[in-house]
Image (tube, rainbow, N blue to C red):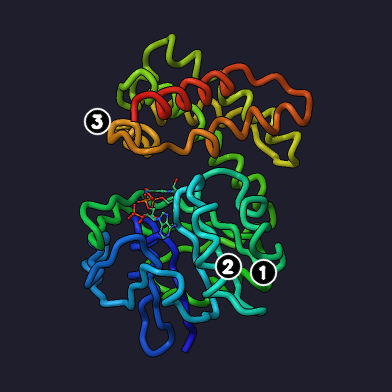
Amino acid sequence: MTKIAIIGPGAIGGTLAAWLDIPPNNEIFICARSSFQSLSVETPFGKLESTPTVFTNPAQAEQVDWVIVTTKAYQIPSIEPWFKHLCHADTKVAVAQNGVEHIANLTPFIPAERLVPIIIDTPAARVATGKIIQKAPILMAIPNNKLSLQFASLFPTDNVTINLTDDWTSAAWKKLCINSPGAVSSIVNQHANIAGDPKAESLMRNMIRECIAVGRAEGATIDDEIIEQVLSSQRHAPAGSMNSLHADLAAKRPMEWDARNGVIHRLGKKHGIATPYNEMAAHILSLIETHST
Ligand SMILES: NC(=O)c1ccc[n+]([C@@H]2O[C@H](COP(=O)([O-])OP(=O)(O)OC[C@H]3O[C@@H](n4cnc5c(N)ncnc54)[C@H](OP(=O)(O)O)[C@@H]3O)[C@@H](O)[C@H]2O)c1
């Protein structure tokens, strides 16, 4: 029996917890800020229902084999108390978040050799505490190594796709090329297809260019053609589609502006690469968050 704790049972954490709840192989513990009785996830393959143990106080938690972190990136500092109670000297930690700083964010708590960074491409939404709609099959990219193989083996083999990649850095930066221009539709409070407006398209194009330049300086291999691919998918996004940063802004919740735009400016500065579009986007979103939420 493998003991697995999931910190942050939101859209992604709840979805992963439901797929991992495979007795007698796995025992699932949920580390939450508020309690709930049961987990219900509507997936493209049917409804998954389970009743995992839910902890709301780190002192209640017991030591586990694996921890999976699925909070928003800016919530990482708040989860430190969970690590103290969940981890022993051999506990492994996987982190499924947007951005490119999975390892840097977690190494203050866990050594890098026990960390699995995850890029997850699975749209999901929490409709109520413990109730989630998973809108597409799970698709994850993790580094191709022994620890990641152990992580992948926790999941069922059907209906969950986990790609082991020799170039996780490029996978992460390519995802950031998709996420970073989402700041434009968020700031102007329009749906993704605002990318069809030449002014929005120009802003997005420049943001992606900056992301590519900084990503390459960080060691990623990214073709320029990703720019047109991202812009085209934004232009042709279904009417009404809204990225998660925009959804958070609309709901007056804190936003992942630092993980999606601030990081491009911060790492750009380190490499002497100017990133004025992402810098401005991060500053505007930060101001909105400070003064309007
Ligand atoms: N949702 C998607 O479609 C999607 C797709 C790809 C990637 N991602 C990325 O995946 C990550 C998670 O996103 P999400 O949409 O799942 O976010 P979410 O629905 O907001 O879930 C975050 C969860 O973390 C919990 N949490 C925060 N601080 C905590 C703490 N100190 N202790 C315990 N739990 C804590 C929150 O608690 P409360 O219940 O109290 O809020 C919430 O349940 C983000 O980086 C996001 O960008 C999301």
Q: CA distance from mark 1 to mark 2?
A: 6 Å
Instruction: Where is residue 284? Give x, y as percent.
Output: 47, 20
Instruction: Where is residue 176? Give x, y as percent.
Output: 55, 38
- Three-letter code for the amino acid on which mark 1 is drawn: Arg
Q: Quadrant of the C terminus?
A: top left
**Label 3 residue near ligand 1, CB within 8 Å:** no
Q: Is residue 66 left or right of residue 267?
A: left
> How many residues crowd mark 3 within 10 Å: few (<14), some (14–19), many (20+)?
few
Instruction: Where is residue 111? Give x, y as percent.
Output: 70, 65
Q: Is residue 252 left or right of residue 29?
A: left
Q: Earlier in the sequence, mark 2 or mark 3?
A: 2
* Front position among marks 1 and 3: 1
* Front position among marks 2 and 3: 2
Residue bearing mark 1: 114
Tell which of 191 and 113 is nearer to you: 113
* Relative height, residue 239 to residue 118 (above, below): above
Tell which of 205 and 183 is nearer to you: 183
Quadrant of res 43: bottom left
- Three-letter code for the amino acid on which mark 3 is drawn: Gly
Q: Secondary structure at mark 1?
A: helix
The tag on residue 134 is none
Q: CA distance from mark 2 to mark 3?
A: 36 Å
**Label 2 near label 1: C-beta < 8 Å?**
yes
Q: Earlier in the sequence, mark 1 or mark 2?
A: 2
Can residue 231 be seen by looking at this rendering? no
The tag on residue 240 is 3
Tally the numbered discs.
3
Instruction: Where is residue 255? Give x, y as percent.
Output: 42, 37
